[in-house]
Amino acid sequence: MLRNVIYISLSIILFFAGTLIYGIILNLNEITLKESMRLKGIQRIDNPYLIVDRKNYLVELYSGNIQIKKYRAAFGKNRSSIKTSPDDFVTPVGEFKICDKTDSTKYYKKLTLNYPTVKDAAEGLKKGIINKTEFNEIKRAQEQGGCPPFNTQLGGNISIHGLGKFNIVLKNLPFVFNWTNGSIAISNEGMDELFSVMQIGNNVKIIN
């Protein structure tokens, strides 16, 4: 019995180690943002924006109409596209702006999105998820260019963030699984690059 337990445990360890090694080998071909810009003949990134592709697990960085680089991403555990609760684990689809940048969080760095937007709030008000006071607070925040309140029944605090202390493991998995509360997670190294070019007010579009 003990021997079987040992064999099973060793098999699991070897499988996990092999998976990580395979992921590391796959990531060896990834180039830096600087190298990608050089290959595309771009010296600087003007008017950067992001397209978050949930279907293909990607965050794509654009300068104008030129795609500069792709980053592998993980999303909320719930595959629905409409967020209606703080605890539904949905990554909302829509057009957003970066409303805050933070360089010291549980998950490394983060770019906070202005979800819920006025459009989200209007739908929430229509469906009775939020009240008029909450709608006005969200509208006021968007008009002022700030982050909306995150404590309404529509949820909030959706961001693009790193992997934190789990970076070495999660970034080297050769597959992607969704594990966040609704935010978008990419590697810490990817966050360093996005953090260097993305500013408050830049556009982020999340698509299915």
Image (cartoon, rainbow, N blue to C red):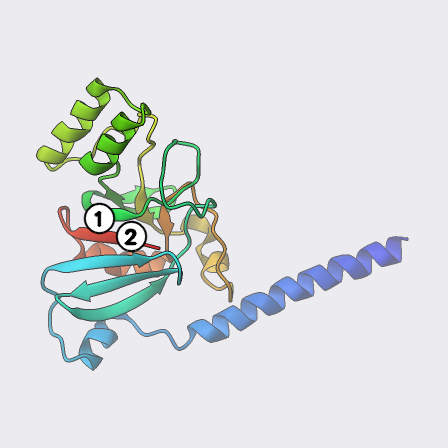
- Residue 47 in percent (x, y) is at 10, 60
Q: Nearer the viewer, residue 113 or 135?
A: 135
Report the residue marked by disc 1.
95
Within the image, what quadrant is residue 207 found in? bottom left
Q: Residue at coordinates 43% horizontally, 40% vertically from top-left?
A: 89
- Residue 12 in percent (x, y) is at 70, 60
Q: Are discs 1 and 2 less than 8 Å apart at CB?
A: yes
Q: Say few, some or many: other residues with alpha carbon within 10 Å of mark 2 (under 14 / 14 to 19 / 20 or more).
A: some
Query: Label 2 sits on what residue type?
Result: Ile
Using the numbered discs, state the Cα–Cα distance from disc 1 to disc 2 in whole angstroms: 6 Å
Q: Earlier in the sequence, mark 1 or mark 2?
A: 1
- Residue 166 in percent (x, y) is at 47, 52
- From this view, report whether residue 136 is shown above or below residue 70: above
- Confirm whether residue 117 shows in the render: no
Q: Say few, some or many: other residues with alpha carbon within 10 Å of mark 1 (under 14 / 14 to 19 / 20 or more).
A: some
Report the residue marked by disc 2.
206
Query: Label 1 sits on what residue type?
Result: Glu
Question: Is residue 206 shown left or right of residue 136?
Answer: right
- Confirm whether residue 169 shows in the render: yes
